Image (spheres, rainbow, N blue to C red):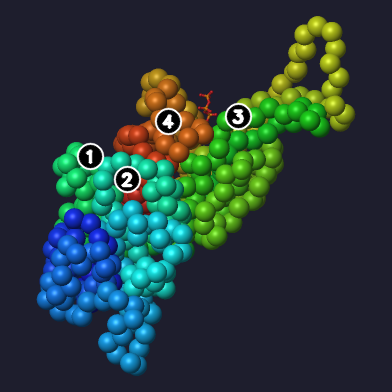
C-alpha cells in the first residue's frame, strides 16, 4: 500500500530517532519515495547523512537552506507528499502543530501539507499524560490527524510506562491498514441521534438527563472521516461536533427527535440511535410558570414514543443500531432489546463500571450483533470506541450483504 507513495517523514528530537531510521529504511524498501525532514534537535541524535543514505534522498533541516533556486523546499515537499508521518513526535512538535506555530522547516511543512498525516508520539510517561499534551492531541485528532499510540514499556528516561515510540513495523502496518480501509462509508448516508432530550414542564422547568452527546458526536465525526454523508440529530447539549462535514440538526424534546429521525430515516443507510431519549414527559405543559403551593406536588407523566422501536418497525434496508444502558446481565438484556426493537446491532453501555457513562470522555461498551456475536471494548476514549464500533458495523454490513 505504500509502494509508489510520496512520504514525508518528519523526525523530531527524541531518543527514539534511531527507530525512525528503521522506519525510513523499511518504507524505502517497500517502494515508497521517502523524504526526511528533521528538526535541529533530531540531528543531535542521528545525523542527516544517515537518513539521506536510508531514504536515498536529500534530507531537509533548515528552512533557509534552499537547495534548488527554482523551488521553495518546504512548500514543494508539502505539496509533493501523499502521506506525512511524524515519528518520533515530541510533545513540542505536537504542541506547535496544534497551535499553528511554524518556526522551523518541519513545523512549517506540516502546516502547509494537505497529505494524510500520521503522528507517532514518543515521550516520557508523565509528559504523555500532561493535560496540555492531551488537549493538543485531541485538537489534532479533531482536525483529522491520525495518532499511532505509543507502546508501553521501558523508557529511555528510566520510567516504565506509555510513551515508547511504536515499532516501525507496526507504524507501517497501521498506516497501510488505514490507507487500505480508506473511506469504506463513501456513498453511504449515516443518521445518528445524540444527547439528551428535554421535556418541558412550564416555561422555566424541564425534565432531562445527563447525556452529553459525546458518544454520538464521536460516531458522527468518525463516519464523516470514513467518507459517509452524516446527519446528527442532537438533543440540547453544549458539546460541539468537531467536523464541519457533519450536518447537525438541533432538537429539544423526544417528540421533536421522533419527527426529525423519521423524516431522515427513509434516505438513510445506517442509523445509530445513541441519544438518551426521555421515556416519560409531563402530561400537561403549563403555559405560565407553575406557582408553588402548600403540600406536595404530583406531576402526571406520560410515555414518549419509543423512536428506535418505531424505526425498527419501519426498517427496510437500513442497518439499525441501538444503544442500551445496563448494570448487570449486560448481554442478556442487550439481546432482548435488540430483538424487541428489530435492530441489527446494539451497543450496551456498562454503566456500573468505573469510567463508563454519560458525561465523561471515556466509556466501556459491548457491541452485540444479530448473529449473537459480541465484542467487548474495554475502557477507552469515546473517540477510540467510535472507531472500533465503526469497524464492527462495517464488518456486519458486509456480512449481511453476503
Ligand atoms: N430510545 C428511543 N426512544 C425512546 C427511548 C429510547 O429511541 N423513547 C432508544 C435510545 O436512543 C437507545 C435505546 O432506545 O438507542 C435505549 O433503549 P431503552 O429500551 O430505552 O433502554 P434503556 O434506556 O436502557 O432503558 P430500560 O432498560 O429502562 O428499558
Can you give x and y, in whole percent of width and height, for residue 123 in the image? Answer: 26, 49
> Could you classify mark 4 by the number of other residues whose Cα lies within 10 Å: few (under 14), some (14-19), or many (20 or more)?
many
Height in image: 225 above or below 302?
below
Can you give x and y, in whole percent of width and height, for residue 243 in the image? Answer: 52, 57
Mark 1 CB in 8 Å range of ligand 1?
no
> Mark 3 or mark 2: which is in front?
2
> Mark 4 or mark 2: which is in front?
2
Tell me which numbered mark, 1 or 4, is placed earlier along the sequence.
Answer: 1
Pointer 1 and pointer 3: residues touching (CB < 8 Å)? no
Question: What residue sits right under mark 3 in the picture?
Answer: 209
| Residue at 35% over, 49% down | 391
Q: Nearer the viewer, residue 266 or 223?
A: 223
| Residue at 23% over, 69% down | 2
Q: Nearer the viewer, residue 335 or 392?
A: 392
Location of the N terminus by quadrant is bottom left
Can you give x and y, in whole percent of width and height, for residue 213 in the image? Answer: 55, 41
| Residue at 57% over, 44% down | 239
Q: Secondary structure at mark 2?
A: helix
> Which disc number belongs to residue 128?
2
Q: Alpha-carbon distance for marks 4 and 3? A: 16 Å
Tell me which numbered mark, 4 or 3, is placed earlier along the sequence.
Answer: 3
Q: Alpha-carbon distance for marks 1 and 3? A: 37 Å
Q: Alpha-carbon distance for marks 1 and 4? A: 23 Å
388 relative position to 279: left or right? left
Tell me which numbered mark, 1 or 2, is placed earlier along the sequence.
Answer: 2
Question: What residue sits right under mark 4 in the picture?
Answer: 356
Question: What residue sits right under mark 1 in the picture?
Answer: 161
48 relative position to 116: left or right? left
Amino acid at each position: 500500500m505504500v509502494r509508489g507513495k510520496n512520504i514525508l517523514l518528519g523526525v523530531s528530537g527524541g531518543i527514539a530517532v534511531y527507530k525512525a531510521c528503521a522506519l525510513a529504511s523499511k518504507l524505502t524498501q517497500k517502494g515508497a519515495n521517502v523524504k526526511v525532514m528533521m528538526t535541529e534537535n533530531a540531528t543531535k541524535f542521528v545525523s542527516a547523512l544517515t537518513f539521506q543514505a536510508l531514504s536515498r534522498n536529500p534530507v531537509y533541516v533548515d528552512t533557509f537552506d534552499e537547495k534548488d533556486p527554482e523551488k521553495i523546499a518546504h512548500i514543494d515537499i508539502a505539496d509533493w507528499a501523499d502521506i506525512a508521518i511524524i515519528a518520533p513526535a515530541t510533545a513540542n512538535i505536537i504542541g506547535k502543530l496544534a497551535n499553528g506555530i511554524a518556526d522551523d522547516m518541519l513545523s512549517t511543512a506540516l502546516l502547509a501539507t494537505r497529505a494524510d498525516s500520521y503522528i507517532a508520539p514518543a515521550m516520557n510517561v508523565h509528559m504523555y499524560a500532561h493535560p496540555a499534551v492531551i488537549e493538543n492531541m485531541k485538537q489534532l485528532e479533531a482536525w483529522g490527524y491520525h495518532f499511532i499510540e505509543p507502546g508501553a514499556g521501558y523508557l529511555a528516561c528510566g520510567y516504565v510506562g506509555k510513551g515508547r515510540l511504536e515499532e516501525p513495523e507496526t507504524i507501517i502496518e497501521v498506516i497501510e491498514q488505514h490507507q487500505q480501509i480508506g473511506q469504506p462509508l463513501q456513498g453511504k448516508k449515516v443518521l445518528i441521534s445524540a444527547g439528551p432530550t428535554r421535556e418541558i414542564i412550564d416555561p422555566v422547568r424541564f425534565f432531562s438527563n445527563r447525556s452529553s452527546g459525546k458518544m454520538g458526536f464521536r460516531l458522527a465525526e468518525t463516519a464523516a472521516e470514513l467518507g459517509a454523508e452524516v446527519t446528527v440529530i442532537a438533543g440540547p447539549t453544549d458539546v460541539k461536533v468537531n467536523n464541519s462535514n457533519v450536518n447537525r440538526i438541533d432538537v429539544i424534546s423526544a417528540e421533536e427527535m421522533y419527527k426529525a429521525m423519521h423524516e431522515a430515516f427513509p434516505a438513510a443507510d445506517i442509523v445509530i440511535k445513541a441519544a438518551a431519549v426521555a421515556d416519560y414527559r409531563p402530561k400537561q405543559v403549563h403555559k405560565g410558570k407553575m406557582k408553588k403551593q402548600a403540600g406536595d406536588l404530583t406531576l402526571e407523566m406520560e410515555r414518549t414514543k419509543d423512536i428506535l422501536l418505531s424505526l425498527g418497525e419501519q426498517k427496510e434496508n437500513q442497518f439499525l443500531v441501538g444503544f442500551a444502558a445496563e448494570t448487570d446481565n449486560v448481554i442478556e438484556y442487550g439481546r432482548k432489546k435488540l430483538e424487541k426493537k428489530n435492530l441489527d446491532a446494539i451497543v450496551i453501555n456498562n454503566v456500573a463500571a468505573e469510567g463508563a457513562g454519560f458525561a465523561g470522555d471515556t466509556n466501556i461498551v459491548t457491541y452485540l450483533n444479530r448473529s449473537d456475536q459480541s465484542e467487548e471494548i474495554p475502557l477507552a476514549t469515546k473517540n477510540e470506541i467510535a472507531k472500533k464500533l465503526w469497524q464492527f458495523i462495517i464488518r456486519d454490513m458486509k456480512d449481511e450483504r453476503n
